Image (cartoon, coloured by chain):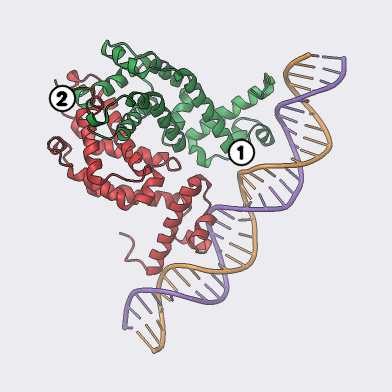
Chain colours: A green, B red, C purple, D orange
DNA sequence: CCTTTATTGAACAAGCTGTTGATTATTGTT
DNA sequence: AACAATAATCAACAGCTTGTTCAATAAAGG
């Protein structure tokens, strides 16, 4: 955009600052981080930080925005309704699969930002993104009179559930593959908690 | 415990500090709050703050812990399985009902602490509490071989969903009654998203 | 090779923190 | 109503972080 292909030094510096951010958030949470901490961990001069970011909030914002826009690119023209046919054939819904792979690539940052030392605002944004991308589109052609609960609460329910499962996956060491996770997630929503628990026939 | 019935001045001071905390978190988030802000908004001397709290983190911790232990008292010997019979008769499960009433009483603090300017760690603790109180007990007598997904992911799914619905209720102005909310919540879990959406017969 | 640009290092005022000691005000109790 | 105990106030302190600036140095790219 406004940046022409940046100097190698700039790329290096920014990468080191962001790595430091991830590590320090893991250690003490964003709250406790000072610009000093960041620049010491990144082995750069404190003044250099201010050449790239207004303050630590600006750094966090840019880091988060990069992730968000990365996700947006993956899901831009998704058709959520297709999930049904994939899932009922035990095939992972491709876009959700790609999402899990994207989280895996950015695992260290995603883990901390979505974890207990992370940013509640970011978690809110993620939930909002899930709502808009997946469930509000599905909800459009539901018939209100047939619904047992208000649509907005249903959407909140499934969106929060999905984010929560992603969080659990990240926090517990990502032992399932993206493919497995996609199936787990879509099955629970499609068939419902009671059914996947084996309580109903 | 260690406190004997406290001086009226102490009660007054602490209440004003906590009210200030809630308001200031709403305004600028916990991050941005200084002890100065708190004591100015509470109209007390800055030194007085330190007579009651070690620092602003101590204040947050104590405020959160009070809520958590309030919840624990409500749910200490709950039998989650009873929810099924209540819900299928369209009667709200009493303990969940009490929980919503408790949230309503503490609405201003709950709203901000569970909102986007709130504390991700607290949201994690709430989720953990929901897991332990409700769903791990149910999960004990599920047969693993009959489950379509791993138990821990199912538990994360429903626990996150429940917290998410509570958050949505608080953020959107608590327009439904605790009684309505209890039914909405338990129905979604019992019958599943697909069914309550009116998709299945 | 040489111009451009990034990084360094040092210094600055301003603001917040947590503590202390002396003083004043409010409580709870005889 | 009087008094002793305790809470709140006020001012001052060193220590730390912040964001900015300037001159000097180092690295990149054409």
Q: Position of residue A195 (x, y in %)?
A: 19, 23
Locate the N terminus of chain A by quadrant.
top right
Locate the C terminus of chain A by quadrant.
top left
Question: Image check: B169 left or right of A122?
Answer: left
Residue at x-position 23% and y-position 41%: B182
Residue C11, placed above or below residue B87: below
Q: Where is mark 2, residue-wise?
A: A199
Instruction: Tell me which chain the residue with mark 1 is part of.
Output: A
Question: Image check: A52 left or right of B29?
Answer: right
Residue at x-position 20% and y-position 29%: B191
Disc 2 on helix, strand or loop?
loop
Q: Earlier in the sequence, mark 1 or mark 2?
A: 1
Residue at x-position 53% and y-position 29%: A65
Q: Position of residue B9 (x, y in %)?
A: 41, 68
Question: What is the quadrant of residue A66 in the picture?
Answer: top right
Q: Where is mark 1, residue-wise?
A: A55
Residue A5, placed above or below residue C12: above
Question: What is the quadrant of residue A48 in the picture?
Answer: top right
Q: Position of residue A113 (x, y in %)?
A: 46, 32
Q: Position of residue A192 (x, y in %)?
A: 23, 25
Disc 1 on helix, strand or loop?
loop
- Give me the C-alpha separation between circle 1 and circle 2: 52 Å
């Amino acid at each position: 955009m406004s940046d022409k292909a940046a100097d190698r030094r700039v790329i290096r510096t920014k990468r080191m600052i962001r790595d430091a951010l991830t590590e320090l958030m893991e250690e003490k949470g964003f709250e406790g981080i000072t610009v000093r901490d960041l620049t010491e961990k990144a082995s750069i001069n404190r003044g250099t930080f201010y050449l790239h970011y207004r303050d630590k909030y600006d750094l966090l914002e840019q880091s988060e925005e990069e992730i968000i826009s990365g996700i947006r690119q993956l899901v831009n023209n998704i058709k959520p309704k297709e999930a049904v046919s994939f899932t009922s054939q035990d095939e992972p819904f491709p876009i959700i699969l790609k999402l899990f792979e994207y989280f895996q690539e950015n695992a260290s940052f995603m883990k901390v930002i979505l974890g207990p030392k992370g940013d509640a605002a970011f978690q809110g944004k993620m939930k909002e993104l899930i709502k808009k991308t997946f469930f509000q589109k599905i909800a459009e052609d539901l018939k209100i009179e047939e619904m047992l609960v208000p649509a907005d609460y249903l959407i909140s329910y499934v969106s929060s559930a999905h984010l929560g499962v992603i969080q659990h996956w990240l926090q517990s060491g990502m032992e399932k593959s993206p493919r497995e996770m996609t199936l787990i997630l879509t099955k629970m929503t499609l068939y419902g908690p009671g059914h996947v628990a084996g309580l109903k026939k």
